[in-house]
Image (tube, grey):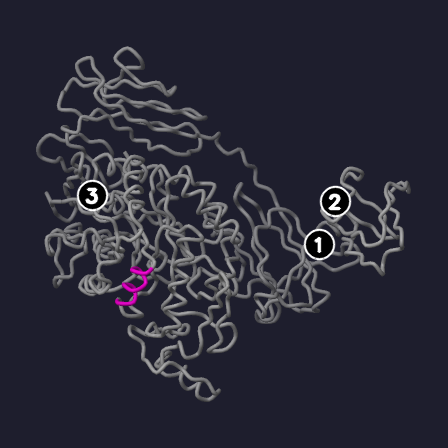
Amino acid sequence: MKRVYTLLFCLALLSGTARAADGWPANYGGVMLQAFYWDSYWDTKWTNLQAQAWDLAQSFELVWIPQSAYCGGQSMGYDDLYWFTNYNSSFGNESQLRSLITTFKANNIGTIADVVINHRRNVSSWVDFPAETYKGVTYQLQSTDICRDDDGGAAFTWATKNGYQLSPNNDTGEGWDGMRDLDHKSENVQKSVKAYLHMLLEDFGYTGFRYDMVKGYSASFTKIYNEDSNPSFSVGECWDSSNTIRNWIEGTGKTSAAFDFQFKYTVRNAADKNDWTFLGKQNDGNWPLVSVNFNNGAYRRYAVTFVENHDTEVRPDGSSNGPLKKDTLAANAYMLAMPGTPCIFLKHWQDYKKDIKAMIDARKMAGITNESATLNFASNKSYYALRTTGSTGQLFCVVGPGAATYTPAGQWTKILSGLKYAYYFAPSMETPFVTLGSGKYEDAQRAQLVAVSQNSGAQLVYTTNGSNPTATNGTKVASGTEITIPVGETTLKVGLLVNGAVTKVITRTYNISEPSSFEPYQVTVHVNVDKVAWSPVNFWTWGEGKYSGKHGTTAGKWPGDIITATKQVKGRTWYYKTDTITGEDDAVNLVVSTGTGSPQTVNAMDITKDVYLEVQNEKDANETSKYVIKDVTEEITTGINSASLMNNEEMNNSSFIYDLQGRKVATLTKNEPVGNHHSQLSMLNSQLKKGVYIVDGKKVVIR
């Protein structure tokens, strides 16, 4: 079903390039994943996401990733600095980003770019923006592109004092004092933004945009940008009441959808207050966009529903903005049974993938779209029940602590249930259902097969070898039978068997790995500070992703722990700390500092083995306030210093290459480079094996 729908939608997009931007497709049945959370630097690495492409494609049509350009250091992307030229972000480099987007596209996933254009970071002062040349055109914002009332007038005061001019225009939206607010009335700003958006779509291959902080500038500019760039999908973060969000959607000329914040808070209130009548309550007319009671549901198409995101969750520092504290499964079950376009939060996907996959399967099998009709059936403090009618069937959903006690009136077949939720299909759908969605899992899995039919004698017949089940081919079982999906690759096909004939077949594909046999091991990080003479030496360490609670410091706050443990290795003093790697994707991250945390080094990331790190007496070219760390592990552990590139003056007219036994193995003539990398001796590739050699009395490592 999904693949056919995606193909038809793509053909519609290709039918003409002159179509007007339409914000969000009508009757869209896709589901989106927010593939990050706050400080998700490990889980959201471009390479990590790319490795999951096939698995994600079984459930999602869209994946929203963080702002992907360099922001001047480790960043989630909301202090955007570069737009055109530097894509070495905290999640990977440009090549890895392009590979991710291409791989997603090959798996029928559209990538949604996080577009931050309300504000922009400066290079060093209040008014200097980077000059970037793209396709022969140089783009650079000027001081006159900054709103006159930026920072409540503080920017104007600074500019006047230092001889700069700001824009004559005040902000067209809400101000924010974190960075420079851009004047979107400026022709230079509009030119730069338009070029930037075209580059994201046409060069990088993004499918659409998630606009950050759209209340910071007039909705009319989103209309201008969307009509110019024509994205297939556009959604704005208009964090406000539903009335404001609706007005913003209208202000864009309906060229953009919006996140349904009131939906999120309504679900949060029901869970937190343990009162599920909140899902049907009206509060001063401020209904969610997907409400059936406002304008006949006219805004459902433009509602991107969610129950948690990177701003509302509880962040690592303890801050939050109305997080969902419990009943995560029930919240997602409700969202996935409702109209609108659901956006699943990465942490929820990681914690409850099996349940959420099955919920998404049910949604799509019923043909629920962003414009489907829904109707409340029952509501009290312990449960809320609704029915949503899709293009191919009806899905009945019950959520709340009393979900298991409620039985819907009429003929319904329970297809799925879990903690505080239950899903039912109308028997008229005449279909089999499998409670285990397609995808990757670890260790053998159990899947329940359910017959949804008006015929009480309906059975199921299935195969696990990819062949089509028939009345004579496959294993016949009763509805509700559980089967085991073994380790390995399995194509499960299940048919509905009624009166001796198979009327419908569904397919599920599994890639199941052996359970992890990982054995924890210790790693020791050694740091030498001779070149900077720091004292004391602080280590700030942390883990990421599901290991975010590990590798932390004893102090628990910046700058971490003062390290007093030292050892002498190769005649040098090394400060060290030992930690335990507890999983295959676990790693230690480190920042070294002195004093109260300044000066400090850049981040040393993804440490998975014993390392020797040397703090250099030089600043990083990009993070100019931080010192460089050099990994000298091989020099210390092998006793061989890396060789520097030898120039002509350092070479004799004819340099001989000897092995460690003193045998001459090759000759280099003047002007031929010698270095510590195999590529620098490529002309001798056929003669030299990997190893250590002597050239003009210097050791050279050929790798």
Using the image, tell me which numbered label, if any, was put on residue 632.
1
Task: Please state the horizontal and vertical placement of residue 335, each as a whole percent of the image.
Answer: 24, 47
Q: Is residue 600 above or below residue 647?
A: below
Nearest the eye: 608 or 681:
681
Crowding near the residue tagged with mark 3, few <14, some 14–19, many ≥20 C-alpha atoms within 10 Å = many
Q: Quadrant of the C terminus?
A: top right
Identify the residue shown where x is 76% and y is 53%: 642
Query: Is disc 2 in contact with disc 3, using a CB cutoff of under 8 Å?
Result: no
Provide the major secondary structure of the magenta segment: helix
Residue 569 figure quarter: bottom right
Q: Which residues are magenta?
A: 220-228
Residue matched to label 2: 682
Please say if the residues under marks 2 and 1 sit with CB atoms less than 8 Å apart: no
Please tell me which residue lies in front, 396 or 229. 229
Callout 1 secondary element: loop
- Chain-order first, disc 1 or disc 3: 3
Q: CA distance from mark 2 to mark 3?
A: 66 Å
Mark 2 or mark 1, which has the lower sequence index? Answer: 1
- Graded by Cα atoms within 10 Å as few (under 14), some (14 to 19) or many (20 or more), the crowding at tag 1 reads some
Q: Position of residue 326 (x, y in %)?
A: 29, 50
Q: Please name the residue shown 87% across and 40% down the image.
A: 665
- Residue at 53 percent across and 46 percent down: it is 586
- For residue 122: magenta? no
Provide the residue designation for mark 3: 399
Per the model, the C-alpha gap separating discs 2 and 1 is: 24 Å
**Residue plotted at (30% across, 73% down):** 174
Q: Residues within 10 Å of mark 2 (few under 14, many from 20)?
A: few
Front residue of 270/265: it is 265
First along the sequence among labels 2 and 3? 3
Amino acid type indicated by mark 2: Ser
